[in-house]
C-alpha cells in the first residue's frame, strides 16, 4: 500500500503531462515560419495570412510558397512563350488495393474417402494486397520569382 501512495502522484503527473502534450499540434508550416521569422515578416499581410493557412496564390514569392508548402521534391526549368519558368513539383503517396488471385493444386492429407481430405484437387484463393505509388500532389510555376500558376491535387 505504501508503494501505491508514493507511485500514484508520479503516475498522475505523468498522465497529465502526456494528456496536455497531445493537445499541442504544430504543423510543418508553423515550424517553417518559426525557423524563418525574417522571411515570414517580409511577406505582405495578405500573403502571411495565406501562408499560415497553408495556401498558395498567384503573385506569391518563392519564399512564401516555401513557407506554405515546404521544399519541392522536384524542380524543373522550362520556357513558355519566350519566358523562362521554374516549376516546383510536390509528390504525395497513396496506397491502392490490388486484387490477387492464386491458383494451385497439390497433395491432400487424411483419408482419401472424405470429400476434402486425402488427395486434393486444384484450388484458388482471391485476396487483396496494397501497393504504394507516388502521385503529383501539387505544382507551382514561377516567372521572375513569382507564382503565375499553381494546382493542388488532393486525394481522399
Image (tube, helix red, strand yellow):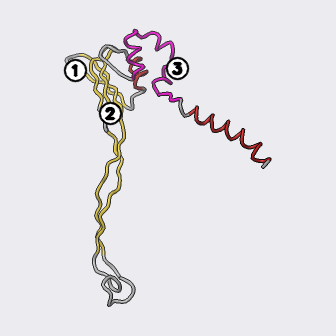
Specify whether residue 46 is painted magenta. yes
| Image quadrant assignment for residue 48 | top left
Taking the image as shown, residue 98 lies to the left or right of residue 28, namely left
Q: Which residue is mark 2?
A: 137
Q: Main secondary structure of the magenta part?
A: helix
Magenta stretch in the rendered image: 24-53
Taking the image as shown, residue 107 lies to the left or right of residue 3, namely left
> Considering the numbered disc 2 on the image, is that residue within a helix, a strand or a loop?
strand
Closest to the observer, 104 or 20: 20
Q: Which residue is mark 1?
A: 80
Q: Which mark is residue 42?
A: none
Residue depth check, mark 3 versus mark 1: number of the one nearer the observer? 3
| Of pointers 2 and 1, the one earlier in the residue sequence | 1
Percent across and percent down for residue 151 are 28, 26
Pointer 3: residues within 10 angstroms few (<14), some, or many (20+)? Answer: few
Closest to the observer, 121 or 2: 2
Q: Residue at x 74, y 43 (%)?
A: 7
Q: How far separated are the C-alphas under marks 3 and 1?
A: 36 Å
Pointer 2: residues within 10 angstroms few (<14), some, or many (20+)? Answer: some
Q: Which residue is mark 3?
A: 34
Looking at the image, residue 117 lies above or below residue 137? below
Q: Residue at x 29, y 74 (%)?
A: 123
Amino acid at each position: 500500500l505504501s508503494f501505491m501512495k508514493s507511485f500514484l502522484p508520479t503516475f498522475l503527473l505523468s498522465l497529465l503531462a502526456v494528456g496536455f502534450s497531445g493537445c499541442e499540434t504544430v504543423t510543418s508550416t508553423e515550424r517553417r515560419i518559426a525557423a524563418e521569422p525574417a522571411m515570414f515578416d517580409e511577406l505582405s499581410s495578405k500573403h502571411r495570412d495565406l501562408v499560415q493557412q497553408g495556401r498558395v496564390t498567384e503573385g506569391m514569392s518563392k519564399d512564401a510558397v516555401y513557407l506554405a508548402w515546404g521544399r519541392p521534391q522536384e524542380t524543373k526549368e522550362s520556357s513558355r512563350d519566350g519566358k523562362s519558368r521554374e516549376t516546383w513539383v510536390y509528390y504525395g503517396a497513396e496506397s491502392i488495393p490490388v486484387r490477387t488471385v492464386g491458383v494451385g493444386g497439390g497433395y491432400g492429407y487424411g483419408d482419401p474417402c472424405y470429400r476434402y481430405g486425402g488427395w486434393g484437387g486444384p484450388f484458388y484463393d482471391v485476396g487483396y494486397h496494397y501497393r504504394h505509388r507516388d502521385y503529383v500532389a501539387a505544382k507551382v510555376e514561377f516567372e521572375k520569382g513569382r507564382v503565375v500558376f499553381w494546382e493542388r491535387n488532393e486525394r481522399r
